[in-house]
Amino acid sequence: MVKKKNPLYRRLPRELRSELGKYLVIFLLLTGSIGFVSGFLVADGSILAAYEESFEKYNIEDGNFRLSEKMNRAQQSSIEDFGVTLYDNFYATENLTNGSRLRIFQDRSEVNRVCLMEGRLPETADEIAIDRMYADNHALSVGDTLQSESRSFTISGLVALPDYSCLFEDNGDSMFDALQFGVAVMSAEGFSTFRNAELTWSYSWKYDADIAPADEDAEQEISEELMKVMLSEVTLEAFVPRYLNQAIMFTGDDFSSDKAMMTALLYMVMAIMAFVFAITTGATIAKEANVIGVLRASGYTRGELIRHYMTMPMLVTLAGMLVGNLLGYTIFKDLCAGMYYGSYSLPTYETRWNAEAFLLTTLAPGVLMLLINFVLLRRALGLSPLKFLRRDLSRKGRSRALPLHGRIPFFTRFRLRIIFQNAGSYAILFVGVLFANLLLMFGLIFPSVLNHYQETLTDNLLCNYQYILQIPLSAMNEERKLESLLSMLLFSLDAQTENEDAEAFTAYSLVTLEDEYKSEEILLYGVAADSRYIDADFSEEQIYISQAYAEKFGTQPGDTITLKEEYEDELYEFTVSGVYPYEGALALFMEQDYLNAYFDLGNDYFSGYFSDTEITDLDEQYLSSVIDLDALTKISRQLNISMGTMMYMVDAFSVVMFLVLIYLLSKTIIEKNAQSISMTKILGYTPGEIGRLYILSTTLVVVLCLLATLPLETWIMYWLFRAVMLTSISGWIPFYMDPRIYVQMFALGIAAYALVALLELRKIRRIPMDEALKNVE
Amino acid sequence: MFLEIQEIRKSFGSGENRTEVLKGVSLAVEKGEFCVLLGPPGSGKSTLLNIIGGIDAADSGEIAIAGEHMSGMKERRLTDYRRRHLGYVFQMYNLIPNLTVQENIEVGAYLGEDPLDVDELLHTLGLYEHQKKIPGQLSGGQQQRTAIGRAVVKKPDILLCDEPTGALDYQTSREILKLIETVSRRYGSTVLMVTHNDAIQRMADRVVRLRDGQIRDNRLNERRVPAEELEW
């Protein structure tokens, strides 16, 4: 027997025409969300693949170290005997007239090979190829000239250095800074113009194939062994194995966390849209109850009707998926790749078909949509044919009116009844508003948190300049006590200053234990007992944690904290006496003598200066870093650059989502009540009065939703923000809720709603009076 | 005359499909009169009622209530016209499903400048004990009583009833007709009732017969009987 085609499907084109507005906005929202997430995942996948391949393609180093002077052949050969090959990776640092620092390498041919993005590699002595992102941030292009105090460079090309996919100037920095720091390469001829005194003696190493570590644990183990070997040969100023090198690894870590966030976002949108579909379809079922009753009575099965009512939502979803993926692979992919290229100095990539992206953005949400619709439709169509014929769609027998006191004004009672009638729609609206506003809050809070952080830092700086001195590693070599003592003595004499504002302190670095979150560097300040800069009572070995520490780890006075040396197992315990109001670093403050004694550093040991005025008479070679406001706000500046554009997109998306949701749900409510509205028109109610009854109810709910979700959103945002700060960023940026954000969110919500309300008012005006004359009771 | 209808014409469709439903209908009804419009299906009686009610527009002709002419009225004035002059009762009760009986009547009361007392009306309608129920909990007769309450509570000049007993059984129909008779007498409303039930003409002051879009008979009923005496 030939299976006949269900004639009900002939309704579908008509249904599409008559409900074009509804299906169009859902289609656009789905297409936009799927397109963006698909584009994001494709870009993420393609760039991640390019990034991962870059390790081999560009032969990225296994680690690097820095010496105070050039290594001799014997030292090099001794170290290489360990099973590594060493490569010169010297660089010069030029302070440019544009206020930034450029780290210039010689073009590399063996390790960390350069990826040319635009133009050509430098050939003549005055040519330079600069990092592509640094060029973007300073609006530089090929042919432009860069100027330092003594040199002038012509840009011959834009490049990506694979060992600087993320522009961390110093591995200890909590954030990279692509605005004030850049990398570049010059030809051998050009690079040879730098004098030895201008060079930093940096070397890269690659493990020989037979000892190459298989995983991070092995890498840690072998790098610790290598460091011991190096320490016996040379004086190390820095030692950074690849797995700890933020300039190389940060980018890859960031990719995976972004992916999880975007996918979660898409599922939320899809689930909300599925419920919106179900509610609008539910309204159609209510409208067509008699017809459904007749069809069911005539022998149509529930399954046939479920399939029929599911067809349009699924077709629209399917269309959204197709077009979304198409846009994802074209427009959105470039947009998202642009976002990554705006933050990272990545090599070129090729777009790759991403099966996982297809699964995550198409199959999984499609199934989600199918399931939610199926379950809700199955329930809605589960009533007996007789109930449909009688238009009695309640499950629990006949529904009753909720008692409302007669003293409540009539219009108010009317509106309350509408609210009760549409409780399901309003519940979805609540969830949707919560979600859309959470996104909006995220978009708005981000710049505000960063600004607040900068302001807070300015207000509670320890001093205007903190000079961290570079203690020669030779002074710390326990295996050669005498040499180290001499080295320390020499350093103490050389690192004196005449500046009267200067106050010596001891800085000591430990790290947190790696448990729930990644290990973080903690700076221990040993402060003079009568310090001019740190106002705290250090008597009786009192120890204070910085405000940032207290907030990040939830530590309180009285708690005991455990820290350890970075590459050693020895643990140190400190009992916290109080919290010092300093947001600039995860730090501990204690008396200098106590710290020196605790770590056996010697009575006169110091390793830094606090000063309110600039210290100009320090020997550069002993200067490790200067912590001033500029350095402390690096993290917020970079986050602003990396995330700023994205935040505007998040804001826009959340407003669109909010608009679509309100439009669809209020449209459903108006349609559900079309007959009553028509009747009130016949009775003589004006459109304005009808609007006050039917639209004002939704207005009340929207206002309530907007207000009621605010505390919930703040709470969720606080925890989300904390989780992001704990897992993805070294250091700490405190959560701050600017009260103006509440006002902005409410105003945006109301403005968006006003637009929808106008559309609905127009819809009410268009409901014909003969609607009430249809025999549908 | 209180209600004057002159040369009303109305057609639907266009070209070859054009059907003239009303072919120049003229009628005059006195204030407080109970007028029954009789006719077979398709005779144009409901269309005439809708045009009088201002929810449909005539192609030509003129309608005036207490001297106020309807022709040329824009939507806003038509709304005002319905608000001030008319009450409507349909075959299908068209109650607002999520409002209680009392609230449905209040929907009408809101529109009147000096509406009837809702509680008193509920007693008159025999709905006092059902006032907190929603339409879904009521029988057809109770729903139609509510619809009548909603229509008369604002004391309309004219009560328009389109087959008000069309969906009801015999006994309930008589009760409803009696109710319409009672409230129109008590509150002085002019009643225009469309029906295809010949028996109902006996309770009317005026009987108008329509067929094929034209008035075939328009006469005053000399021997009116109360609604409860009607039989069919």
Image: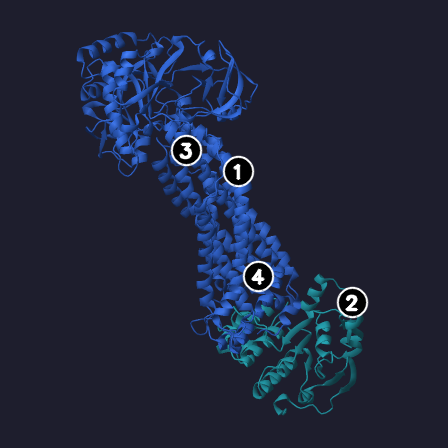
Q: Which residue is mark 1?
A: A335
The tint of chain A in the picture is blue
The numbered mark, 4 or 1, whose residue comes first in the sequence reads 1
Chain letter tied to cyan:
B
* Sequence-wise first label, 1 or 3: 3
Could you tell me which chain the residue with mark 3 belongs to? A
The CA span between labels 3 and 4 is: 56 Å
Residue A677, position as x, y percentages in the image = 60, 65
Residue at the extreme front = A210
Q: Amino acid at mark 4?
A: Ile
The crowd level at tag 1 (other Cα within 10 Å; few <14, some 14-19, many 20+) is: some
- What amino acid does circle 1 point to? Leu
Q: How is the image coloured?
A: by chain
Q: CA distance from mark 2 to mark 3?
A: 81 Å
Q: Residue B72 location, x and y as percent?
A: 78, 64
Chain to which the residue tagged by mark 2 belongs: B
Let me know if marks 2 and 4 both belong to one chain. no
- Residue denoted by label 3: A53
Three-letter code, disc 2:
Ser
From the viewer's perspective, is the residue at label 4 or at label 1 nearer? Answer: 1
Q: Nearer the viewer, residue A766 or A602?
A: A602
The one of B30 and B72 positioned closer to us in this rendering: B72
B27 to A279, vertically: above or below: below
